[in-house]
Image (cartoon, grey):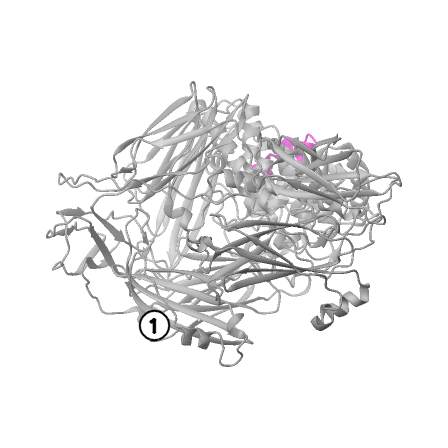
Amino acid sequence: RYTYGKPVKGKLTVTCFSMFYGKKRNITKMLEFSGSVNFTLDSLEMKNITYADWDPHAFHQMPIEITAVVTETLTGISQNASATAFPKHHDYSLEFFEFPRVLKPSLTFIAMLKITRFDNTPLTHDERQNNVMISVEPSKNVGFLQRIYYMYDDANESQTNETTQNLSYPVPEDGVIQIEFPIQENTTRLNIKAKFLESQTSISIHDTFYSASMTYLQIKKASQDVKAGAPLELNVQSNKPLKEISYMVVSKEQIVAAGKKKSTTFTLTPENSWAPSACVIAYHVDDNGEVINDVLRFPVQPDFKNKIKMHWSKNKARPSEDVTLKISVTEPKTTIGLLVVDKSTKLLGKRSDITEDAVLHELSLYNTALHYGEARNAYSVFQKCNLWVLTDASLPEHIGDYDFYSEGVDYALYDDVVHPHLENTAMPVDFGNPYVRTNFPETWIWREIMTRSTETTVNVTVPDTITSWVASAFVISENLGFGVIKMPIELEVFQKFFMSLNLPHTVTRGEHFMLEVNVFNYMKENTEVTVTLDTSDTFEILIISNDINAMGNQRSVWVPSEDGRTAEGLEQFHSEAVLLDLAKRSSLTENLNFTFPFNVVPGSERVQITIIGDMLGPSINGLDSLIKMPYGCGEQNMINFAPNIYVLDYLTKTGDLHSNLKSKAVSYMREGYQRELLYQRDDGSFSAFGNSDHSGSTWLSAFVLRSFTQAQPFIDIDPFILEKTAAWIASHQKLSGEFQEPGRVLHTELQGGTNSSTSLTAYIMAALLEYQMDKYDNNIRRALNFLEFKLSEGISDNHTLALVTYALSIARSTDAKKALDTLNERSEQQGDHRFWISPASELSDSWQPRSVDIEAAGYALLSHAKQQRLLEGIPIMKWLSQQRNHLGGYSSTQDTVVALQALSACAMLTTGIETEMDVTVTSASEEIPVTYKIKKENRFLLKTKEIAATQPVGITVSANGRGFGIFQLNIMYNVDNSHSSRSRRSAQDQEAFDLDVTVKDDKKDINHLTLNVCTRYLGTGSSSRSGMALIEVGLLSGFSLSPSFMCVDDPIKKVETDEGKVHLYLDSLNASQVCVDIPAVRDFKVANTQDASVTVLDYYEPSKYECLFIDLALKFVYCLYTEVYILYIYCFFLIS
């Protein structure tokens, strides 16, 4: 069904198959589809698909995999689902559950039996008139070896069998029967058979509980369902008299209740602390010191005292209609968290709402007890509740622990809840003026509500999406704590006549695409429809077919000229900044020039100028996207977290922190903090991809530890997380003081060569110094000695020396000044700028410095700040402030974080000067100069203007007055790939990667293609392995990644899709070739497709990359066609 409740009409292709010793047989059927359809397999088909012609027993064992693909008639869009079916050979299914796997002779055997029809539906009334027959065959005591022998020789079992016991039980309405009978003394084995009409099943119990005195204890509960606040009756039985019984209740690895009882039957009242599951142990110590005990585990349904209820003012609504959501809570002055999302997001697997089931699931994660198998002695009974016992009583650990079967009992923690059906109320039809629906959010409401009373109303306007909206909520109050709505409620949004457009996400200039206008008519009458597409200079309508048998009233469709338009070729960026420093002079004039390359794509050129009055201003305004790189791993995610710390710290110290900016930065930090916890491993460490990595990373763990510690003044950070991470880091230090890296080092400069251990130790020591916990003083002292020794030996690498200097500076080492002096002697001077370069930087053709050079300058500037030598650091600060990209960041995560920390630490030097500045920008493309006025009140306001692009670009910026400001010229353009199918660049002006792309193409199938991408790293020597590698695969317009694509395996660690691209994350690349197939499926009809690009790059050194273009345009020229209910318009884009 559609999310608005109406059935989907189309074609169903259902495929059933099974595997038998590597062989596969399948049956495919095609059926007309309208909401639902039934299909059958006859007995011959079943025997064929389950290989019954090969092996008669296979028919009874083979599971059948069923895949269903529904293709919508209107659009041709397909959706699929799969399931597994197990053939049933009887009319009824009988299943034993919740029965002990170990016998306690002289006590009662209890088991549950569930009877359903073969399709798992309940028995009918007539069927329940038949009783279920139970036969019990006990066996007497035999030796251990005899028991093994009898397990494989049923003929000999009759020698030890006792009299068979027959029982009869009526079948209740739910089909669940509790079977209970006494176990005779010396019985060591039970065979239990259940038979209902012609269907039957059986179980066998082979083990007995070990007790030296053959004294046993058994605990039972009277009711199946256990709820917090409701009395729970427990009964304890024993084959010998007991004077007193002790009990303990364990939940979430905590003892939540304990006591002693004189009576064998007693009542406890479960509390919410017992949820979601509890483990009850009853035990007794006899006069000889032997422990006699039993354990009972069961789910507990919590009782949230803080109730919340919601209902819509109506069950169905029209788009843009006003509705009211009424919310009732238990007590006033509570906080409500409200979420309303499109139901389709849930169908895609995006679950972000908080429900009772979600809360109980989170609570269940605290039950981390290991599965010890079935309890066969008193000691293992305590282990079942994850309890370790210190006692002088007799409690042998391993006697009786042999295990023929390791099967466990699966507990269903929560009852299935049936979703209520919405009323099918009639909706009036409005034939008034056409309304253009433009509001299509995935999340409609995400709001925090503070209530004054127990009743709250939320008045809202329904979005334009034809769908169902799902509302969920939770409530928190001081007295009653947490509460959550039991079941989300839905609002169905629908109208009987509407249109929808099927459009590609983006199209490239020169491409042809089909504009599909789908007209849906659920009215009873047929109506002639005229669909009009407004003309525009940005596209040309080549073919129009409007003789359509569609239904509805007249409607006009407008296509915005800028939406989804991209230029062909490869996108390039260039930024150049001027520091407007009028601290010691009253005027300044600078000329900036840029020449577009010969292969620039005409019309793709964009020239943007920005100006702001604060050193950190460009970064403050770009906090939401500082770098143009995906960030899908544990280190890259920190780009959403760490920069906010330094911005907030800087603005707090300058007194310029306003509530709206603070709120934005804090929200980014909280989101980044929660996301980062996804990459924490069970041992407390952090790694690029969490538990899927073979080990945590000391480098990444140190980065997270330092950032989380620095964030504590602004958001709540769990101190347990910090301590667990710090302890793990400390455990990887050698006696020499050097820190080891057990995991994969993603940062190139920290993963190889003679200085790798020095860099890593300096990085980690800096993090531990930030953490400031006395217990790690010895670790810091050993690391400091190690670094001082390495410094005395001499450090040749500038990046390593800068990092060591920073670590020594914050440790207040006596060698810190010497290290900084040495570092400054190696610096490059260019006017009033100071910076450092690595050997490979001299050969780079990039306008932007290497990431390691940015980091080196950042650490050097931080060292100047720590050593109170800020005036010496001003030339570094000026250089760093002019290297940012057009987004306010640098090349990657680390250089951006380090540079922004350094700038924030030293930008205070510029805030003490009153800024009053007039700025004039002139260019050949602008007849009138652009003027700006910067003063204290607007110094954080980023002023942006796009100017006409000329070849070459010439800009003159003049400033008069006093203070500081930053002017930046940003150039964006595309380069044409028609001159060469390959583009490469590396820091050495050589190939950094080898990249090959081939197309696995079925000429008969224009809806699918597979790209085979192969790459390897070409570095040698100490650089024989890259840092984290990123493969970006551009998909042709109209195509998307196939939903069947699953490639999260070494060396591919993660796959993400974004705006027509597929991002593949790899730990690193070396000389060994890595190949991966990227399957794509066509979602929209686009012809004359422009080339797509495939790029591989080093994430931490983006100047090392290789790019290939794929030309597949000829394949996707196809005939245009029209169908009933759909209007296709063939468009050719002309970008103005």
Q: Position of residue 852 (x, y in %)?
A: 61, 49
Vertical comparison of 660 with 753: above or below: above
Quarter-of-image position of residue 34: bottom left
Vertical comparison of 982 with 936: above or below: below
The amino acid marked with disc number 1 is Asp
Observer-nearest residue: 383 or 129? 129
Q: Which segment is the magenta one?
A: 864-878
Q: Position of residue 429 (x, y in %)?
A: 16, 41
Q: Does the image show residue 214? A: yes
Magenta stretch contains residue 867: yes
Q: Which residue is mark 1?
A: 1005
Residue drawn 38% across the image and 53% down it: 973
Q: Position of residue 802 (x, y in %)?
A: 68, 44
Q: Main secondary structure of the magenta part?
A: helix
Element on which disc 1 rests: loop
Vertical comparison of 1086 with 416: above or below: below
